[in-house]
Amino acid sequence: MNILIFGPNGSGKGTQGAIVQKKFGVAHIETGVIFRENISKGTKLGKQAKGFIDKGELVPDDITVPMILNRLKEDDCKDGWLLDGFPRNLAQAKALYEALEKEGIKLDYVIEIILDRQTSKNRIMGRRLCAKDNNHPNNIYIDAIKPNEKDGTFTCRVCGGELSARADDQDEAAIGKRHDIYYDTATGTTAGVNYFKERAVVIGVDGLPSVKEVSEELLKKLG
Ligand code: AMP
């Protein structure tokens, strides 16, 4: 099963992606996570990507596209993948679609989580990352996934691990830039989603309800 998941930053895309990934037992490939791991390890890729990420800009396609196409060839992707954070623009969407066509790889589903810009922004600013596991969702502004709080300090609601906020999550200008890219229907991410609407099965879900309600709706539609 090969799946793409789209949604603006802050729509719960990572959380829903983790649920879908578990259901189908496929590899969960998150572009943002790959970049952040490379930055913390100080790799060449990390050094190239950091400046763009800190400003909320896209890492250039000539770095990102081959990185992802190579990642999809790794062993853990043999039984399928869920791609999150890529494609991020129309050019990446075309490059991915053409590469899959060329290799005869079927795209089973494209998921689109639909959420307005203001709600997405609020959710981003409340998001906290667990030091132990990236798939432990915590958000200080969403009751259902609110971290544990003791003496004014938040800890992971799943494992008690240390939490941190991503620098780019607290920067309103950077959030604005990321959303400009997402909601751009000419060449941005929404243009990429629309490109797939003519070429694949696109499943749209409303991202406004609770995590549980959104996942139920999504899993029902995925069959
Ligand atoms: P995310 O964790 O998905 O919000 O990604 C964090 C940052 O990584 C983005 O703001 C971009 O700077 C970069 N990034 C993630 N995915 C892509 C992509 N497909 N193309 C270019 N840059 C990306």
Image: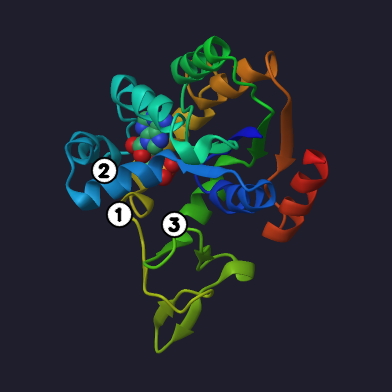
Of the two numbered discs 1 and 2 on the same chain, state the one appearing first in sequence.
Answer: 2
Q: Quadrant of the N terminus?
A: top right
Asked whether residue 177 appears in the rendered view, the answer is no
Q: Residues within 10 Å of mark 1 (few under 14, many from 20)?
A: few
Q: Distance between the residues labelled 1 and 2?
A: 7 Å
Residues 189 and 119: in front is 189
At 40% from the left and 89% from the top, the residue drawn is 151
Q: Is disc 3 placed on a helix, strand or loop?
A: helix
Asked whether residue 59 appears in the rendered view, the answer is yes
Task: Classify 140 as above or below 195.
Answer: below
Q: What residue type is labelled 1?
A: Ala
Q: Quadrant of the C terminus?
A: top right
Q: Is disc 2 placed on a helix, strand or loop?
A: helix
Q: Which amino acid does label 3 sit on?
A: Met
Q: Which amino acid does label 2 sit on?
A: Asp
User: Measured from the top left, where is residue 190 in percent x and y?
Assistant: 56, 25
Task: Classify 82 as above or below 42.
Answer: above
**In the rendered image, which residue does mark 2 sit on?**
54
User: Measured from the top left, where is residue 129 in percent x and y?
Assistant: 41, 62
**In the rendered image, which residue does mark 3 sit on?**
125
Q: Quadrant of ligand 1?
A: top left
**Residue 167's mark?**
1
Q: How far apart are marks 1 and 3 (CA)?
A: 10 Å
User: Measured from the top left, where is residue 8 in percent x and y?
Assistant: 54, 39
